[in-house]
Structures are given as structure tokens and as C-alpha cells.
Image (tube, helix red, strand yellow):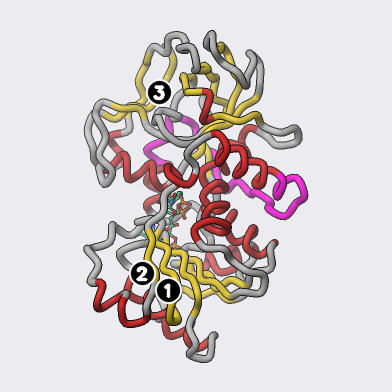
Amino acid sequence: MVKSIIISKHGGPEVLELKDVKVGSPGPEEIKIKNLAIGINFIDTYHRSGLYKLKLPSGIGMEGAGIVQEIGSAVKYFNKGDRVTYSQMPLGSYSEERIIPEKIAVKIPEGVSEKVAASIMTKGLTSHYLLFKTYKVKAGELILFHAAAGGVGQVFCQWAKSIGCRIIGTVGSDSKIDIAKENGCEFVINYNKEDFDKKVLEITNNKGIGVVYDGVGKKTFEKSINCLKPMGMMISFGNASGALDPIDVKKYIAHKSLFFTRPGLADYGAGRAALEEGTSALFEQIKFGKIKIKIFKEYKLSEAKKAHEDLEGRKILGPAVLIPN
Ligand SMILES: NC(=O)c1ccc[n+]([C@@H]2O[C@H](COP(=O)([O-])OP(=O)(O)OC[C@H]3O[C@@H](n4cnc5c(N)ncnc54)[C@H](OP(=O)(O)O)[C@@H]3O)[C@@H](O)[C@H]2O)c1
């Protein structure tokens, strides 16, 4: 038996329960992993709360890193003892040990710790597709990224800066301004104090901006649209403040011939080729020091409830991990 966080009903952080579970042995194309670190992502709160409904009871968590304990009979890429990291479905990374399909895992390169690997797979693969696939950013281009001091913010902004983008970042409190600047933002707006759309128009001499990366959702949607210039792209990739209401196309999209997209890693990261492309690009950025990962906080696995309270309470400034006891 191993310790694992299980939810039996949707709800607040209190539904995260540490339980003893039996892991068993991997199937033919699966590997069994002893997790040494587990990534915490905002999407875990959507799974927990029921914003994204699960079949219950369920494990939770999409991301982790550790050591391969056992391999299935048809496993191609891994051996017992390999250091691996993974993200994506199936859920269940909040666990001391678990079984995953080998197709969602990659080896951790030398020089990268399990903690760093566990904290950046989802955030890094997301940043990769947002920057190079959903919208192809150009060197010198001014872009807007919301919650620039958060987990995806730390990776995305450094990566965007390293390829020459100029970033306007938003944050929810003054104490996060310096963090967003360290992440590479040239301009930082506290959107709880200022109308960020007015500020963006001021910065761009009323021209507006070509792309908005919006992981905040409900609270920022309308003003994000105001920031865009004609034929600009609104990338709504998350709902930290709540899910979007149905969109009035005439009011929000048609008047400036905008593009709207709601991308997800499940599609952009599907398949071995996409996983390898994204992870090799990400690890290269780390190897050459273009992206420096500062883990904001480590929680024990048994403190998952506290970690979710902090994440939803906007107290986590950068990637954070759970460490199995
Ligand atoms: N579509 C995809 O493929 C994909 C993949 C990964 C992540 N995401 C999305 O990316 C976003 C960032 O994820 P993350 O894991 O790195 O989280 P995070 O940015 O570390 O945390 C979310 C941040 O959102 C901001 N926020 C604004 N309104 C909020 C509210 N009402 N409640 C809580 N937070 C609020 C907070 O920053 P301030 O205090 O500075 O406002 C908070 O720190 C999330 O929306 C997530 O769902 C999407």
C-alpha cells in the first residue's frame, strides 16, 4: 500500500484525502514510478472543485517525476531505475507511487533535478505550444500575458523574453511586480489597481496589441478584448478567476475581426512526437540558462489541502511541488 491523495466528492480543498491505496503492477505498455516530486497546477483545482467533472472516486494531479520501479512487457523507452518525468492524463500524480502509460513520460536530462522536472512539464509544454503553435510570436513583438508572476508565468515570460518578445505582464498585487519583472516583463500592471486595458492602450499609443494570453478567464476577458488591435488573437487558456460565459460574437469578436481560441495541452501535446518536441525544446532552454526555475515552495504530499488553499488564495508565486513523505 502507498499513500495517495484521493477525492470522493467534488468541493473545496478539504475533499483532498490522504489514503492508502494498492498500486499493483504495470500493464504491457505501462511503467510503475516512485514519485520523488509532484507538480502542482491550477488545473488540479478545477478537477478537485468539479469545474472539470471527474468520475469519482479519483486520484488527482497530472504531473510528477521519479524513478521507474517496474516496466511492462512491451515497454520501449524505459528501464527500471530510469529517472523520468511526465504530465497529462490519466490523473493520479498526487501519490507516492503510481502506474502511467509510458507514452506520457520522458527521461529527465542530467543536471535537472526531479523537483524541477516535476514542476515544469505542464507549465513548460503549455508555454511551448502557446508561443510557437497557437500563435507564432515574433522577435520584438509586444505581447500581453496575465498572471505573470504565477507558475506558467515564470516559464512563459522567460521563454518569450529569450526569443526577443517584449512582454506586458499583469499581476494581482504590488508584491508580485518585481517577480513579474524578474520573469522578463518590460511593463507590469497590477490589474486589481489599474484598468489594464487603458494602460495597454497607453503603452501602445492606442494601437492595441496583437495577442493576449489570458489564463485568468472570467475577470479579464472583456478588458483583454479591449487591448487587441484589429485581427488580433485572444488566447483564453485558463479560468483561474472562473470559466468564461458564452461569448457574444457580435459584441466581442466581429467588431475588430478578432481571432478567439481556447487551446489545451491535451490536444497540442497529444502523441509522442509533440511530447518529445516540446520537452526537448524546454530542457534546452533550461540547459542554456534561458529559463531558470525557482521553485516557490515545497509541500509534503500530506499537505495537498494547504497547497490548494495557497494556490487558489493567489499565494503561490511560481512553480510549487508536493514531496512524498
Ligand atoms: N490550457 C492549457 O493547456 C493550460 C495548461 C496549464 C495551465 N493552464 C492555465 O494557466 C493558468 C495558470 O496556471 P498555473 O498552474 O501556473 O497557476 P498560477 O498562475 O500559479 O496561479 C493562478 C494565478 O491566477 C491569478 N488569478 C487571477 N484571478 C484569480 C482568482 N480569482 N483566483 C485565483 N487566482 C487568480 C493569480 O495571480 P495574480 O494574483 O497575480 O492575479 C494566481 O496566482 C491557469 O488558468 C491554468 O488553468 C492552461
Q: Residue at x 65, y 46 (%)?
A: 282
The residue under label 1 is 191
Q: Residue at x 48, y 47 (%)?
A: 268
Q: Earlier in the sequence, mark 3 or mark 1?
A: 3
Q: Residue at x 67, y 70 (%)?
A: 139
Q: Amino acid at mark 3?
A: Ser
Q: Amino acid at mark 1?
A: Tyr
| Residue 182 on image: x %, y % | 65, 64
Q: Are marks 2 and 1 in contact (CB under 8 Å)?
A: yes
Q: Secondary structure at mark 1?
A: loop
Quadrant in the picture for the N terminus: top left
**Looking at mark 2, is its residue's CB closer than 8 Å to ligand 1?**
yes
Residue 109 seen in the figure: yes
**Looking at mark 1, is its residue's CB closer than 8 Å to ligand 1?**
yes
Q: Earlier in the sequence, mark 2 or mark 1?
A: 1
| Residue 132 image-quadrant placement | bottom right
Residue 4 disc label:
3
